[in-house]
Amino acid sequence: MARKTKAEAAATREALLDAAEEVFFAKGVARTSLEQIARHAGLTRGAVYWHFKNKGDLFMALVEQVRMPFQSLMDEVDKADAELSPLESIRLACHAGLVRLEQPSYQRILSILLHRCEFFSDINPLDMQDQIGNECFEEMLNVFVLAEQQQLLREDLSPEVATRLMQSMLGGLFHDWLRNPEAFSIRERGGELIDASIRMMQR
């Protein structure tokens, strides 16, 4: 058999990730086998093992596709306007994150992580959620510290508490939305809550 080109290998990997997203969402991670994923993609189990060590590795690659490091969102809004204040950068970065969340693939994969992934073998969904949450906290905290240094934050509000308030609000909103995404637009409702939170935090 001829050796696959890089483009063909990348296309195969993408097809496996797409199939995993669909089957994990329908059946849950623990009840899905690599053979089912391969069959859903129209490929062999050998193709799965060529690209991924095991189901845990495949699942991690899937989650990596929808990770949104807060710093990357900050970089995105700062690139559009380098003169933004720290609080305005936080506000716009949060808005940018909500826009991404409304993309169907983001919604499905994060729903899998939160509601369709059980503890088993090499997958610990709570550890993965903690890692993502802690990373977001530290990156957001750095910006709230800047806001405090520039005397933009209320005097009775520390950067740590401001970060926890914002993260807790967004986390609650996100969980409510994932239970029934048709109930409301997370971008619209979340945007209102983000704007109100920033206003209340300003000096």
Image (tube, helix red, strand yellow):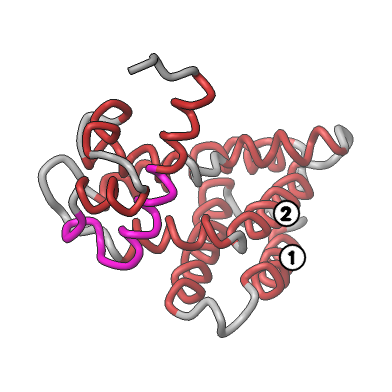
Q: Residue at x 22, y 32 (%)?
A: 46
Coordinates of residue 102 in the picture (x, y in percent)? 61, 63
Estimate how packed mark 1 is, as few (under 14), some (14 to 19) or many (20 or more) residues with alpha carbons within 10 Å. some
Q: Is residue 146 above or below residue 5?
A: below
**Residue 28 drawn in magenta:** yes
- Estimate how packed mark 2 is, as few (under 14), some (14 to 19) or many (20 or more) residues with alpha carbons within 10 Å: many
Helix, strand or loop at mark 2: helix
- From the image, tell me which residue sits under label 1: 195
- Tell me where residue 175 sits by quadrant: bottom left
Q: Amino acid at mark 2?
A: Arg
Badge 1 marks a residue whose secondary structure is helix
Quadrant where the image shows the C terminus: bottom right
Q: Quadrant of the N terminus?
A: top left
Q: Earlier in the sequence, mark 2 or mark 1?
A: 2
Q: Image quadrant of residue 186?
A: bottom right
Of residues 83 and 125, which is closer to you in this image? 125
Q: What's the mark number on residue 163?
A: none
Point out which mark residue 91 bears.
Answer: 2
46 with respect to 158 (left or right): left
Q: Residue at x 20, y 47 (%)?
A: 35
Mark 2–mark 1 CB contact (< 8 Å): yes
The number of discs equals 2
Please provide percent x and percent y for residue 62. 40, 44
Which sits in the foreground, 106 or 201? 106
- Judged from this view, the residue extending furthest toward the bottom is 183
- Give the alpha-carbon distance from disc 2 to disc 1, as whole Å: 7 Å
**The disc labelled 1 sits on which kind of residue?**
Asp
- For the point 29% across and 32% down, the residue is 47
Quadrant assignment, res 151: top right
Instruction: Please indicate whether residue 166 sits to the left or right of residue 197 in the image.
Output: left
Magenta-colored span: 16-32
